[in-house]
Amino acid sequence: MSDDQLSQKNDKPDKRKFFIIAGLIAVLIVSSFFIYNQFFRHDFSDDANAAAVVVTIPDGSSTSDIANILENNGVVKDASYFVKEAIREGVDSKLQAGSFNLKVHQSSKTAIAMLLDANNMAGFKLAIPEGYTASEIINYIATQTSASSSTVKAALESAKKKLLPKAAKGKAEGYLFPATYILPIGQSSETVFEQMISKTLETLRTLGVKESDFNTVLTKASIVQKEVFGHDYYGKVARVIDNRLSSPDTGYHLGMDTVIAYGLGINALDLTQAQLDDDSNPYNDRIHTGLPPTPISNPGEDAVNAVLNPPEGNWLYFCTVNLLTGETKFTNSSDEFEKYKSEYQKWMKDNPDFDKQ
């Protein structure tokens, strides 16, 4: 047998060994991946066909709390890995309380995205407008959730006892921060009222307002909120309030119809002359000097900011001359103010159905 024939003969078992070894390595790799994925991997692979689950995150939950809740509900595989992923993405402080429509067996990245998507929130979405009174908020929540007004009112009373500062003197008006809240299904609206009050207190403290000034700031801001439509006018109205309270020209009277109307529980457009002359109404600021006893609505942050930082100006009067556009004119002249009133009255005459719109 030649050397070449011997070499070719010896090559055959070497090739068989190579393929056998390669096959064993492949099996080991696949097996290792399976074992790692099942027992050591810290994340699920997204399962598009996974079962849906509603997960509730209580108010005040930390990122770790949220991670544990998700793991316990089978949404993510490893709570600690979820926390690391949230921190890595820089969203750990953006995760919030509420009820969410999620799916089990999701990657941490996907679970985070679902939590940050407002469309996945479950429960009653309550969009509280700026300038609503406490009574209007109670009625709105009752309507949206099909709860009785008395039940919602009781929830507010409970929240007041827990969170209202002494400066509020037991009155929630002004302390119910307007924003959008989610009331989880099956939970009392007390949780929403607690969030409203907490948000108001947080806003005031962040803006540097001392607790002894809470009522004064909120009362002024509530008037600003009710008197004009456009945020661009808030600062000027806040300045008018300060100027009137310190001016003998106005007799230190605010003289604003929204305040009088609040005391009567009616719309300012419906005030009669007899009601304007009624001194038994403690909110009649044409007769009683100074600020009203309480805020007259629940103001947003822009109105509060306007009170804290009003522009310089000598305005004592203002009048909204177009109730559709909100156009408002300011002056320090009573004669000019009368001209603005005539302009407003003409607009009302030309738009007789406005209050029905």
Image (cartoon, rainbow, N blue to C red):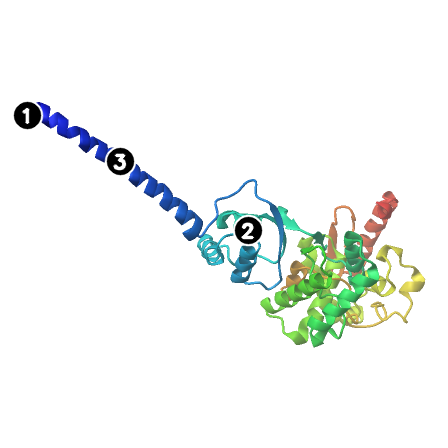
The residue that appears at 64% across and 64% down in the rendered structure is: 199
The residue that mark 3 highlights is 20
The residue that appears at 53% across and 47% down in the rendered structure is: 105
- Dot placed on the residue nearer the N-terminal end, 2 or 1: 1
The residue that appears at 55% across and 51% down in the rendered structure is: 75
Camera-near label (3 vs 2) is 3
- Dot placed on the residue nearer the N-terminal end, 1 or 3: 1
Camera-near label (2 vs 1) is 1
Under tag 1, what secondary structure?
helix
Estimate how packed mark 1 is, as few (under 14), some (14 to 19) or many (20 or more) residues with alpha carbons within 10 Å.
few
Question: Which kind of residue does numbered mark 1 sit on?
Answer: Asp
- Dot placed on the residue nearer the N-terminal end, 3 or 2: 3
Q: Quadrant of residue 341?
A: bottom right
- Give the x, y percent position of residue 74: 55, 52
Left or right, 321 with respect to 67, comes to right
Quarter of the figure with the C terminus: top right
Q: Nearer the viewer, residue 144 or 166?
A: 144
> Is residue 320 among what the camera can see?
no
Q: Nearer the viewer, residue 319 or 259?
A: 259
Estimate how packed mark 3 is, as few (under 14), some (14 to 19) or many (20 or more) residues with alpha carbons within 10 Å.
few
Quarter of the figure with the N terminus: top left
Q: CA distance from mark 1 to mark 3?
A: 27 Å
The residue that mark 1 highlights is 3
The residue that mark 2 highlights is 75
Under tag 2, what secondary structure?
loop
